[in-house]
């Protein structure tokens, strides 16, 4: 229902500019989906443990390919969640850390992971019950 | 490095039974990925607002197809995060709610979404800087 009053219409227009992941075309939705992606979510959680070089992070995020981890880190860097620092040492190396925003996001991911890891008995019981039905 | 002492080996074996999403074959990893899936994450966040019937949930999770929402809800139900209740009314209807575990998970997702939605200026600035480089 639309309100014909000009002031309320202006409010509606402002409201529609608020980021809302539930809105199909909101720019916040792809950011959420990069964060929650198969490897993004694990890379963020790992980086909460501290800075990682690429190969060490690849070992930590067990199963990720070099190409997928590289793509994932580029996306997280572009969205301002991960900082990439090239050190001009011999040999040169690149270190990845979380930005302040990345840290806040990763803390929620870590909490979510801990809840799931700590309740796998409940999950497994639900799965068994579901398949018995 | 493996410790040859029997007691320590027993400890190692117990440790390896702890759920760990970083381990490639841990059963907790697919559960995390169902939770963090494209539509799973939005369905869980929506259900934190209260119970939803299928069609209302489909409208809330803007852009999801009937088939994808149905598959997503089945997966979340199987993992014990969503409860599906068929009401034998005329016409019959089905209502979805979060389980206690689903609620705990969805709260973390809501927090994560609020952080992203509230910091889209930072994200957009990072995106603009990345593309200028």
Image (spheres, coloured by chain):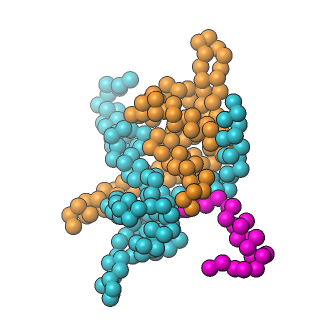
Chain colours: A cyan, B orange
Is any part of residue A76 visible from this angle?
A: no
Percent x, y of residue A54: 40, 72
Vertical order, A58 against B79 (above or below): below
Quarter of the rendering occupied by the C terminus of chain A: top right
Q: Nearer the viewer, residue A42 or A35?
A: A42
Q: Is residue A105 left or right of residue B2?
A: left
- Residue extending furthest front? B4
Vertical order, B122 against A85 (above or below): above
Q: Quadrant of residue B120?
A: bottom left
Q: Nearer the viewer, residue A39 or A30?
A: A39
Q: Quadrant of residue B38?
A: top left
Is any part of residue A109 visible from this angle?
A: yes
- Residue extending furthest bottom? A90
- Residue at the image point whose x is 71% and y is 37% from the top: A129
In reply to whether residue A4 is colored magenta, the answer given is no
- Residue at the image point whose x is 39% and y is 34% from the top: B63
Percent x, y of residue A103: 47, 65
Quarter of the rendering occupied by the N terminus of chain A: top left
- Residue at the image point whose x is 67% and y is 65% from the top: B16
Q: Nearer the viewer, residue B74 or B122?
A: B74
Vertical order, A16 against B115 (above or below): above
- Residue at the image point whose x is 40% and y is 53% from the top: A34
Q: Which residues are magenta?
A: B1-22
In reply to whether residue B12 is colored magenta, the answer given is yes
């Amino acid at each position: 229902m639309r309100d014909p009053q000009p002031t309320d219409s202006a409010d509606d227009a402002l409201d529609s500019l608020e980021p809302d992941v539930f809105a199909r075309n909101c720019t916040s939705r792809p950011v959420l989906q990069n964060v929650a992606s198969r490897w993004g979510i694990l890379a963020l959680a790992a980086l909460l443990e501290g800075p990682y070089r690429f190969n060490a992070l690849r070992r930590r995020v067990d199963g990720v390919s070099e190409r997928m981890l590289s793509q994932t880190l580029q996306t997280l860097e572009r969205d301002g969640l991960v900082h990439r620092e090239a050190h001009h040492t011999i040999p040169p190396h690149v270190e990845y850390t979380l930005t302040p925003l990345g840290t806040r996001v990763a803390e929620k991911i870590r909490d979510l992971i801990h809840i799931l890891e700590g309740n796998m008995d409940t999950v497994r019981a639900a799965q068994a019950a579901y398949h018995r039905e």
